[in-house]
Image (spheres, rainbow, N blue to C red):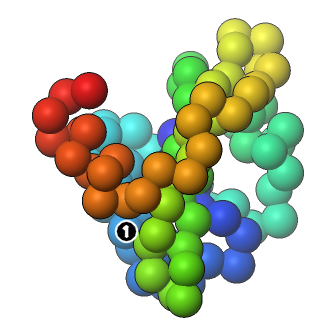
């Protein structure tokens, strides 16, 4: 599941939607949802992680990865990966 940080710009939202398509998963608008609410939504849809796209100065900047258990419990897996490095990982299959 892909989402953005709260109050993300339109550009970051578009990037997150493209990333979701690339990863064959779905995008959900963050809005005012807490991480607990997002993890519950991910669990209901069978997702094991949430990728949060964060921005700096209205541009996608970093991603953070949250692991979600089958019980809906969550933990930060990796924090603050630059977008370009994360995209390279996707391309290389890591």
Residue farthest to the left?
92
Asked which quadrant contains residue 57, the reply is bottom right
Residue farthest to the bottom?
57
Residue shown at 31% from the left, 51% from the top: 85
Pointer 1 residue: 15
The answer to whether one can see residue 17 in this image is no
Looking at the picture, does residue 86 appear above or below residue 89? Answer: below
Residue shown at 56% from the left, 22% from the top: 48
Residue farthest to the top?
70
> In the image, residue 2 lies at what x, y percent?
51, 48
Looking at the picture, does residue 34 appear above or below residue 1? Answer: below
Q: Nearer the viewer, residue 64 or 2?
A: 64
Q: Is residue 2 left or right of residue 25?
A: right
Asked which quadrant contains residue 54, the reply is bottom right
> In the image, residue 20 lies at what x, y percent?
37, 49
Q: Nearer the viewer, residue 91 or 42?
A: 91
> In the image, residue 47 lies at what x, y percent?
55, 25
Residue shown at 76% from the left, 26% from the top: 74
> In the image, residue 93 lies at what x, y percent?
19, 28
Looking at the picture, does residue 2 appear above or below residue 4? Answer: above
**How many badges with numbers are in the image?**
1
Asked which quadrant contains residue 30, the reply is bottom right
Looking at the picture, does residue 85 appear above or below residue 49? Answer: below
The answer to whether one can see residue 61 in this image is yes
Residue shown at 42% from the left, 58% from the top: 82
Which image quarter is the C terminus in? top left
**Badge 1: how crowded within 10 Å, few (<14), some, or many (20+)?**
some
Q: Nearer the viewer, residue 7 or 26?
A: 7
- SS for dot 1: helix
């Amino acid at each position: 599941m892909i989402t953005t940080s709260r109050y993300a710009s339109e550009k970051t939202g578009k990037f997150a939607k493209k990333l979701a398509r690339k990863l064959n998963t779905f995008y959900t608008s963050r809005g005012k949802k807490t991480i607990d609410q997002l993890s519950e939504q991910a669990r209901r849809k069978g997702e094991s992680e949430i990728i949060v796209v964060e921005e700096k100065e209205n541009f996608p900047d970093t991603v953070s990865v949250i692991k979600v258990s089958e019980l809906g419990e969550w933990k930060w897996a990796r924090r603050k990966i630059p977008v370009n490095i994360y995209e390279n990982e996707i391309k290389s299959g890591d």
